[in-house]
Structures are given as structure tokens and as C-alpha cells.
Image: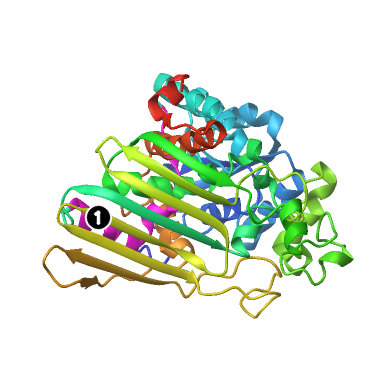
Amino acid sequence: MSDPTTNTAPSAPRAERRRFAVVGTGSRARMYTAALVSTHTGVARLVALCDTNHTRMAAHNALAEEHGHEPVPAYPAADFAAMLRKERVQEVVVCTVDRTHADYICAALEAGCDVVTEKPMTADIEGCRRIVETQRRTGGRVNVAFNYRFNPVHAKLRSLLAEGAVGDIGSVHFEWLLDLRHGADYFRRWHREKHNSGGLLVHKSSHHFDLVNWWIDSAPTEVFAWGDLFFYGDENGRRRGLGADYERAHGSAGAADDPFALHMADSEAMRRLYLEAEHEDGYRRDRNVFGTGITIEDDMSVLVRYASGAKLSYHLAAYSPWEGYRVAITGSGGRLELDVTESPYTEPGSTGDVPVRGMPAPKESTVSRLVLRRHWRAPEEIDVAVGEGSHGGGDVRMLDTLFGASGVQPRPTHTDGTNALMTGLAANESIRTGRPVDVAALLAGGC
């Protein structure tokens, strides 16, 4: 078995390596490309890249060469199906814009490939229905990259609940805070348009809804939600005197002293992936968070009822002075409380730890506290440490599992992806209508 703290995988005969292609070569995909050409070459082989943008694919091939791997064929998005056939792809890693996930997942399944997809599984109800139907018909495997499941703190919480530490679970309270760098970043990128990302309740909160589903071993049945664009956007910027006069940060004098601006020229990786790629598709990664055209919310409250009878109260704010989350799970025999601080405060400008002005700070000093409070007993602090690496060590452990090494826990499936996605989609529908939403009816085509 591999050691999940060292990002290594056991060796396997070369003939047994699965053939992977990565579609969508933005910054998140770098994690998969790097693993396929370095730490996981014993069990997996990168054989192709696919994207709408050749410059970004070239940046990924340059990353492969830095690891001593030969460049792989780079295919335009229109040739995705042909790539699967020609390169004899066995598994596809989908890292495209959320709204296109369903297109690539379904095409890969139809071609007889298995799929690893970034969360969320897709961004809308139609896409979700298509994936569910295509997977059922083809029998192909779809795994969703819910890396937070692989954080040892979260895994410990699940094991305690499964052991009955708090008895039957009655309620979950879950508050997630994104700080002024991380939260702002969703309002610079394509995520700011709901038709692309489904909004934060789909793109970001699918992580959190999946954790709750996994922790309590149940699925959502009814959802009610409120949501607003409270902090970001042009009207809020003008009203509070926060907005600066620029459309995008690069080359704009108005962005020079704006603590919300992203300065991509500070980073060689960002220059390669985005600045130097703009001539192909016009995509701008550094738009003004107080500009026009933002259609997602930044402050959301959600109530969920589960098949087990448990209830969730959830809140996400994307403009907090610190970053972290609080979870409290109350049952018939007690209560589990998890407090995690990922960034205690947010500094403007750049520091030694944040070489790219405007980017979120590395979460290398995450502090967690897990407390079990049983009925009629003194509180018990559970000794558990956050793992090394990004997402509390979740990325390393997830890659070991997804790429065929000896993983630490089962792979999240299309069913897990659907249950997490449907909570967010039902919440969006509730915000739109002002009414509670039946999850099964929404997935079936009613409401």
C-alpha cells in the first residue's frame, strides 16, 4: 500500500498501466497531469490532452517535460471522440468548465471509457439527468473528485459517527467561510456566471453537501434556501466605496492598489495558462470582482431534510475576514463539534507566502479541533491531525485512490455526485421560486 503522506504509489507492471486522457487544461487540471507524469506512473499513463485552447495544452505538456515525461498528443475539443479511439483511452479526467462536464462524461461513457470528473459532476439538472441515464445504460464507472472526503479529519468524524458516538443523528449545522482572497477568486473567473458554474451552491458547496451525505450516510429529500449577491458586484462596490475602475486587472492602472485584484503576471504558471492563452479564446482570468455581469450569490443559507430524518442548516459566505468552517452534529447520545481554521486573517497585497498578488494564501498551517460531547459526560477532545498537502492532505490520498493505487477509502461514485449536486440544484430552485423543493421530483423532471 502506498504511503498517503508522501504522494507516492506502488510500482506495477508497465503493461497494467491504465491509459488516461485529461480534458480541460486549466489550473486545477495541473494536479492530475503532474500525478500522471510523475508520482503515479507505475499504475497510470497520460496518453493525451484535450481542450479548446492549444496554448493551455502546451503549458501542460511543458509541465510533463519538467517531470521527464515526453509530450503527449494535444487534441482540440471538437476531436474528443476521435482522441478516445485513436489513443485507446481507458479513462478520462474531466476538468472543463462545469457546464460542459456532462458532455464529456457522457461521450466518454458512450465510448466505453471510465471517468474521473472534477466536482461538481455537472452544473444543471439536464446534465445530471443525462449522466445518470448514460451511466445506467452503459454501466461505465464515474468517480467524482470529492477530495474533502480524503482529509483525515473528515474521515475520523465519519468513523466516529458510524461507531455511534452521538447515537442517532438528528441535526447538522455547517458554516463555511471563504476569505477575501479565496472568496473573491470565484467572482473573477467564469464561475461568476451561473450558467457556467451553477453558482457557489453547486460549484463550491457540492464538496460540503457530499461531506454531510457521507457523514450521516443518507441522501437529501427536501431543500429550502435563500441567497443574495450581498458583497461583490458593481452595485455593492459603488454603495460601499469598494469598487475600483477597471474591467480586468492585467495592465490596468486602477487595479495596481486594489487588494481584490489578481496580478497574473506575478506567476509563470498563470502567464502560461491564461495570459499567453487569451489570444485564442479571449478568456480573462482576472476580472473585477466589483464589475458587471455577476449572476451568482455570495451569501447563502440552506435547510435540508434527509431520508434518515436528519436535518441540515448550512451557510456559506464568500467575503469573510478569515477562512475556515464549523460543523456540529447532534444526536440522541451527544454532539460532535469540528472547528477548522484554514487562514486566520487576510492580508492585502503580496507576502512571502503569497507570491501572486490576489491569490488565496497557501493553507499550510490549518488548525482543527474535534470535540465529542456525550450526554452526562465531560467533553472529550479527539486527537486528529490535518494531513500534509492541499485540502488537508485530501488531494494526495484521493489521487492514490482514483489512479488505481491502493487507496485509503472507496471512490465517490456518480450516485454520490448526484446526491451532492441535487442539494445545490434544489437550493438554487428554491432561491428562484421562494418555495421548498422536493429533490426526487426535481431530478425526475417536476418540482
Q: Residue furthest left?
A: 376
Residue drawn at 42 percent across, 63 percent down: 393
Q: Quadrant of the N terminus?
A: bottom left
Nearest to the observer: residue 168 or residue 235 = 235
Q: Is residue 251 visible?
A: yes
Q: How many marks?
A: 1
Residue drawn at 20 percent across, 71 percent down: 379
Please check the rendered image and state whether residue 299 is part of the magenta-colored stretch, yes or no.
no
Residue drawn at 55 percent across, 74 percent down: 345
Q: Mark 1: give few (<14), some (14-19) or many (20+) Cα within 10 Å.
A: many
x, y (%) of residue 33?
57, 52
x, y (%) of residue 389?
47, 67
Nearest to the observer: residue 350 or residue 54 = 350
- Write the start and end of the magenta stretch as one range: 140-162
Amino acid type, callout 1: Thr
Q: Is residue 253 left or right of residue 332?
A: right
Nearest to the observer: residue 252 or residue 100 = 252
Which residue is the site of mark 1?
330
x, y (%) of residue 235?
75, 52
Nearest to the observer: residue 21 or residue 322 = 322
x, y (%) of residue 353?
61, 77
Image position of 243 with respect to 440: above or below: below
For residue 47, what is the image quadrant?
top right
Residue drawn at 26 percent across, 72 percent down: 383
